[in-house]
Image (cartoon, rainbow, N blue to C red):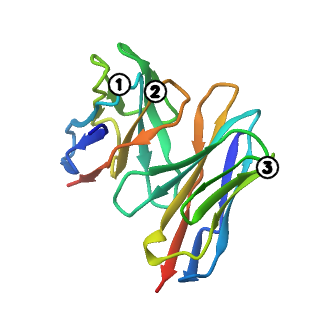
């Protein structure tokens, strides 16, 4: 059963702490993406990767970092430099960059 | 500047009352327009991709259409389970990046 999984569903961050959100896909897609969703706003692109071992900044990359060591995995780290991290984070993948994107179930990040 | 505007922000309909959601866009060369459905607390679910003006696609009670400046998502005889936020996104030919609108929250009353 192919799809995209994200974990955890909920994540709590303390002040000054880095946290990592997991995203895995078994669709054999080359491109993967991270978006942030805030109430009343459209999805905003954080980072994207067109292929393994390569990634580019999106529109709001400050305070975030990513890696793409495997085709299936694209973890997102929210660093302590991100001063307003509370949001719903969505991972997506597509067969090729610019093709139809399919989304995971999301991770909600809350600050303690 | 590339832009996507969805209207209305929210819409309440009675079950069976057909209506349309609008997605207006400004983009320098459209490669594709996407419609997604998003339930509360979940990731968006892909519905349709439209590529050229005049194109139409249907799925159950939903029908998406595209012109050179906007797209409509028509909902025929909706049911309560159609209640969700519907997202529109456009892809620019220039750089293949996708821009999302803020969505329309649809609520179907039984």
Residue located farthest toward the top when viewing the structure as drawn:
A53
**For the residue labelled by badge 2, is the local secondary structure a helix, a strand or a loop?**
loop
Q: In the figure, residue A83 lies in which quadrant?
A: top left
Q: Dots 3 and 1: beta carbons under 8 Å?
A: no
Q: Position of residue B45 (x, y in %)?
A: 44, 51
- Residue at (69, 45) in percent of width and height: B3
Q: Position of residue B91 (x, y in %)?
A: 63, 36
Q: Residue B38 shows which numbered tag?
A: none
Chain letter for mark 1, please: A
Q: Is residue A20 above or below residue B57?
A: above
Q: Dots 1 and 2: beta carbons under 8 Å?
A: yes
Q: Dots 2 and 3: beta carbons under 8 Å?
A: no
Chain letter for mark 2, please: A
Residue B4 as seen in the image, left or right of residue A22: right
- Residue at (33, 27) in percent of width and height: A65
- B21, A111: nearer the viewer: B21
Residue A31 as seen in the image, left or right of residue A41: left
- Residue at (42, 45) in percent of width and height: A36
Chain letter for mark 3, please: B
Count up the numbered dots.
Answer: 3
Q: Is residue A17 above or below residue B5?
A: above
The residue tagged 2 is A95
Circles 1 and 2 on the same subunit: yes
Q: Residues within 10 Å of mark 2 (few under 14, many from 20)?
A: some
Q: Residues within 10 Å of mark 1 (few under 14, many from 20)?
A: few
The residue tagged 1 is A28
Q: In the figure, residue A18 lies in which quadrant?
A: top left
Q: Position of residue B36 (x, y in %)?
A: 51, 52
Residue A20 visible in the current orientation: yes
- Spatial CA distance of label 2 from label 3 is 26 Å
The residue tagged 3 is B67
């Amino acid at each position: 059963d192919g799809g995209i999984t994200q974990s955890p569903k909920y994540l709590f961050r303390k002040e000054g702490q880095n946290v990592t959100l997991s995203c895995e896909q078994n669709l054999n897609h080359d491109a993967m993406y991270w978006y942030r969703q805030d109430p009343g706003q459209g999805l905003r692109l954080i980072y994207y990767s067109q292929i393994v071992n390569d990634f580019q900044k999106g529109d709001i990359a400050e305070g975030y970092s990513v890696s793409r060591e495997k085709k299936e995995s694209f973890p997102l780290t929210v660093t302590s430099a991100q001063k307003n991290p509370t949001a719903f984070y969505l991972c997506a993948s597509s067969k090729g960059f610019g093709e139809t994107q399919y989304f995971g179930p999301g991770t909600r990040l809350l600050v303690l | 500047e590339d832009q996507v505007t969805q209207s209305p922000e929210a819409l309440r309909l009675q079950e069976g009352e057909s209506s349309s959601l609008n997605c207006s866009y400004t983009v320098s060369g459209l490669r594709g327009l996407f419609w997604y459905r998003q339930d509360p607390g979940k990731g968006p679910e892909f519905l349709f991709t439209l590529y050229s003006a005049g194109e139409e696609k249907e799925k159950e009670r939903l029908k998406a259409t595209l012109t050179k400046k906007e797209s409509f998502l028509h909902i025929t005889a909706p049911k309560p389970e159609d209640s969700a936020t519907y997202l529109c996104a456009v892809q620019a030919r220039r750089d293949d990046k996708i821009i999302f609108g803020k969505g329309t929250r649809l609520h179907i009353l039984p």
